[in-house]
Amino acid sequence: MTIATSVVVKPSRSLLIVVGLLSLGVVYVGTAIGLGNVGDLPDWQRWLIAASCMLLAPVGFLRTVAAQKVIRLDISGSGQIRLRNAASTADACDEAEGILVSLLPNSTIWPRFLLLLLRAEDGKLHIVTILPDSLPEEGLRAVAVACRWVAAHNSHR
């Protein structure tokens, strides 16, 4: 199988920063509601909302941190996409074959942002977020072009 594009996608630091700031915002809103500075709610509702915000904000951030992993994305000339776990941020990857996935039609493919929704043969959904700090500029461009090509050819089937 000839690989048209093969890139190692690192976790985006800018995405992690944005999620961290959103989590801090949720904590701030929860604190404001809990102290009674926002809204006119009964005490039990204020404390329930505040506790929910205080609990869910760190959980969301920690889930984002746990999901951060380096992957290798191989797109062949025929449009097959293979997803592999990379051993490190270097180009070395596991010797395992990885999994064959298909690009779903509702994936977002913009020039500087890719949100790839990939379905494996076993039905499992894999979401790959690619931002400009995830890989070099030429790699981002190559993946965007290859994904557009795959999406265009999948729509004709």
Image (cartoon, rainbow, N blue to C red):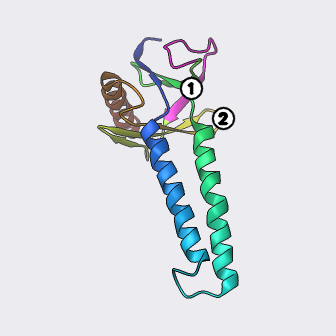
Residue 35 or residue 71, whichever sits in front: 35
Crowd around label 2: few <14 · some 14–19 · many ≥20 (10 Å): few
Residue drawn at x 49%, y 42% as measured from the top left = 16
User: Distance of mark 1 from mark 2, alpha carbons?
Assistant: 10 Å
Residue 109 shown in magenta? no
Name the chief secondary structure element in magenta: loop
- Residue for badge 1: 100
Q: Secondary structure at mark 2?
A: loop
Residue 101 point in image, percent of width and height: 54, 30
Give, as a three-letter code, the residue at label 1.
Answer: Leu
Residue 97 shown in magenta? yes
Residue 114 point in image, percent of width and height: 39, 39
Name the image quarter holding residue 83.
top right
Residue 136 or residue 98, whichever sits in front: 136
Q: Which residues are magenta?
A: 88-102
Q: Is residue 98 left or right of residue 134?
A: right
Q: Are marks 1 and 2 in contact (CB under 8 Å)?
A: no
Give, as a three-letter code, the residue at label 2.
Answer: Asp
In the image, residue 87 sits, relative to residue 31, either above or below, namely above
Q: Secondary structure at mark 1?
A: strand
Residue drawn at x 64%, y 63% as measured from the top left = 54
Crowd around label 1: few <14 · some 14–19 · many ≥20 (10 Å): some
Residue 52 point in image, percent of width and height: 66, 67
Residue drawn at x 48%, y 11% as measured from the top left = 1
- Residue for badge 2: 122
Q: Is residue 74 left or right of residue 41?
A: left
Name the image quarter holding residue 156.
top left
Residue drawn at x 46%, y 37% as measured from the top left = 13
In the image, residue 7 sits, relative to residue 132, either above or below, namely above
